[in-house]
Each structure stands twice: as C-alpha cells, then as structure tokens.
Amino acid sequence: MMISLFKAGLKPQSKIKMYKAIAIISLCIIAIVASVQTTGLTRAVIELLAFGGLIGLALAKPYIQTQASQDAE
C-alpha cells in the first residue's frame, strides 16, 4: 500500500511528512516494547535513544524547496 502511494506521484514534501510519521510511530512502538520486555540499564538506554530520536524529528527543519526546483515545475 505504501509503495502505491509513492508511485501515485506524491510531492517530495508529502513523502517527507509520511516518512516522519512512520519514524515517530516506530520510535513510540520501540519505547513501549522496551518498557514491557526489558529492565534496568537496557530499558533506560533504549528509551533514551527512542526519546532522542523523537526530539530530533520534532526539531528537524521542514523540507524547503529550492528556487531552481520551483522554476522547473
């Protein structure tokens, strides 16, 4: 299904938003699984990495189209 969305001709900005959404959901699932399945230092490290990834995605700059690519459209 996801491949068909990419072939449908989504703009690059839409693709980036979809990748970010998938990454956010994946990191949340990783943090939940780490909370349930592990203990101690392992759990703390996994949750710290997942949280750091979420912060990185939240603070990432949005996609900005260059003037040359705008002129080409």
Image (cartoon, grey):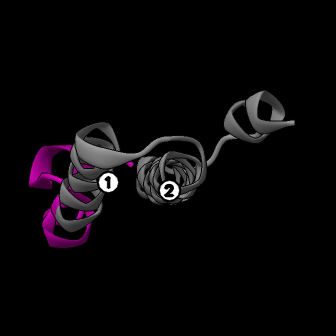
In the rendered image, residue 66 lying in the magenta stretch gets the answer yes
In contact (CB < 8 Å): disc 1 and disc 2: yes
The one nearer the camera, 35 or 69, is 35
Quadrant assignment for the N terminus = top right
Find the residue positioned furthest to the front.
Answer: 40
- Amino acid at circle 2: Ser
- Which residue in the structure is indicated by mark 2? 35
Residue at 50% across, 56% down: 35
Of the residues shown, which amino acid type is indicated by label 1?
Glu
Say which label, 1 or 2, has the lower sequence index.
2
Q: Which label was assigned to residue 15?
A: none
Disc number at residue 47?
Answer: 1
Q: Is residue 61 magenta?
A: yes
| Chain part drawn in magenta | 56-73
Between tags 1 and 2, which lies in front? 2
- Residue at the spot x=39%, y=49% of the render? 73
Q: Position of residue 32 (x, y in %)?
A: 56, 58
Within-10-Å neighbours for mark 1: few <14, some 14–19, many 20+? many
